[in-house]
Every structure is written in C-alpha cells, then in structure tokens.
Image (cartoon, rainbow, N blue to C red):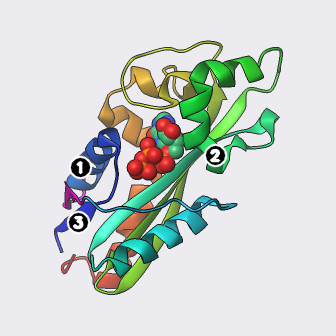
Amino acid sequence: MRELRLVTGNMHKLQEFQHGLGQLGITVSLLKADCDEVQADTLEEVVRSCLDQIADQGHEDFILDDSGLFVHALNGFPGVYSSYVFSTIGNDGILKLLNGSEDRTAHFECCIGCHLCGERIIVTGRSSGEITMGPRGSDGFGYDPVFQPDGAQRTFAEMGLEEKGRYSHRGDAMRHFVAELDKRMGRNNR
Ligand code: ITT
C-alpha cells in the first residue's frame, strides 16, 4: 500500500500529510467526502464517527484527522470546539481570554483515523507549548501564529512544513500512524 486518500476540507492539512507521509513512502491524495462532525467530548469520538460515515458512503482506504488546541488556564478550551472558536473569536479572542494569565501553557492534539482494507487504525499525537503574547508569522493555518512548541523559538506560523512537522501534533500522529501500519502490515508490504 503506497497511496492513501485524505478526507479534509483544509488544504493546509493536505500539504502537511503529503509532506509528512511522503517522507515515509506513502502518497496522499484528496478524497472529497462529507462528514457531519458530531458534537463529542473527545477528538477520537469525532474521528470514529467520521470513519463510520465515510465508510458507509462506500469509501475505502482513506485517512482523516480531527485536531484541537487545549489551553490549560482555560481548562482545555477550545479543545473539541476549536473549529467553532477559531471561526468566531479567532486568535485575537484566545489572546484576550489569556490577558493577565501567568499560565500560557497549551497543547495541540491530533487524532488520525484510517480505514484500510476493512480495518481501522486510530492514533493520537500531541505537541506541548505555549500561547505567545501576540500573533507571529504568516505560514500554516488556524492557531499556528499564536502557538510556540516547547524547544522552539518560533511559532508554527514562522516554520516551514518540515520544521512544523518535527514539532507538531500532526507530525507526531503521523509517526505513530506509520509505526502502527508497519506493525500490522509488515514493513515490506506497506
Ligand atoms: P477538516 O476539514 O479536516 O475537519 P478543519 O480545519 O476543520 O479541517 P479540525 O476540525 O481538525 O480541522 O480543526 C479544528 C480547528 O483547530 C480548526 O479551526 C483549525 O484551524 C485548528 N487547527 C487544527 N490543526 C491545526 C494546526 O496544525 N495548526 C493550527 N490550528 C489548527
């Protein structure tokens, strides 16, 4: 197996998957399919529901992810509401909510789900860091300008695909995913 199709409406995600999985020998193309994101308590529940919905539409051999930003001083908000919060209050809103807070730590999570030959693989990746005092950089998408991962001096929006992939929740999840794939399918048969 050398090709997977990604279900997403976000072309930045597609680029990240093409870059990250491409380095690991897997070609990624886009699959246009609809998933109604259920309101759930965890990213994994959303992923499981989308895998069901898209498999029910007759698709096979596809991958998708649901990701979120968890700000610790806000008890994990926006978390599973990241998409709605980004489209309503955006990065400025997150910065305002953290005004005066000493604790600016946060983490991203990315849950990848894959439906392959009738089997499922679900893995989660994580990136810990902090919310910056203001937005920095213009690359990437979403909360990238306000998130600086631990061990870096730049926000995700100040990094190229390669560097973001080394630090990011999605890069971490992709590495777990490929390890799981290798375990199940054997390194040579992937
Ligand atoms: P899909 O079509 O794949 O669902 P999406 O952009 O809606 O694309 P998610 O639901 O996974 O993606 O993401 C929820 C929110 O979290 C969304 O507003 C993104 O902007 C933000 N987000 C997800 N991954 C991110 C990343 O790597 N960097 C910055 N923000 C991210």
Residue holding disc 1: 18
Q: Earlier in the sequence, mark 2 or mark 1?
A: 1
Q: Secondary structure at mark 3?
A: strand
Q: Residues within 10 Å of mark 3 (few under 14, many from 20)?
A: many
Q: Secondary structure at mark 2?
A: helix
Q: Residues within 10 Å of mark 1 (few under 14, many from 20)?
A: many
Q: Amino acid at mark 1?
A: Gln
Q: Is mark 2 within 8 Å of ligand 1?
A: no
Q: Earlier in the sequence, mark 1 or mark 3?
A: 3
* Residue that appears at 56% across and 33% down: 86
19 vs 90, nearest the viewer: 90
Q: Residues within 10 Å of mark 2 (few under 14, many from 20)?
A: some
- From mark 2 to mark 1, how far is it between C-alphas? 26 Å
Q: Is residue 139 visible?
A: yes
Name the side, left or right, on which 117 lies relative to 183: left
Residue holding disc 2: 81
Q: Amino acid at mark 2?
A: Tyr
Q: Is mark 1 within 8 Å of ligand 1?
A: no
Residue holding disc 3: 4
| Residue 27 belongs to magenta span | yes
Res. 83 mark:
none
Q: Is residue 103 above or below residue 60?
A: above
Question: Which residue, as the protein is rendered here, is positioned at the far bottom?
Answer: 118
- The part of the image, by quadrant, that contains residue 119 is bottom left
Q: Which residues are magenta?
A: 23-31
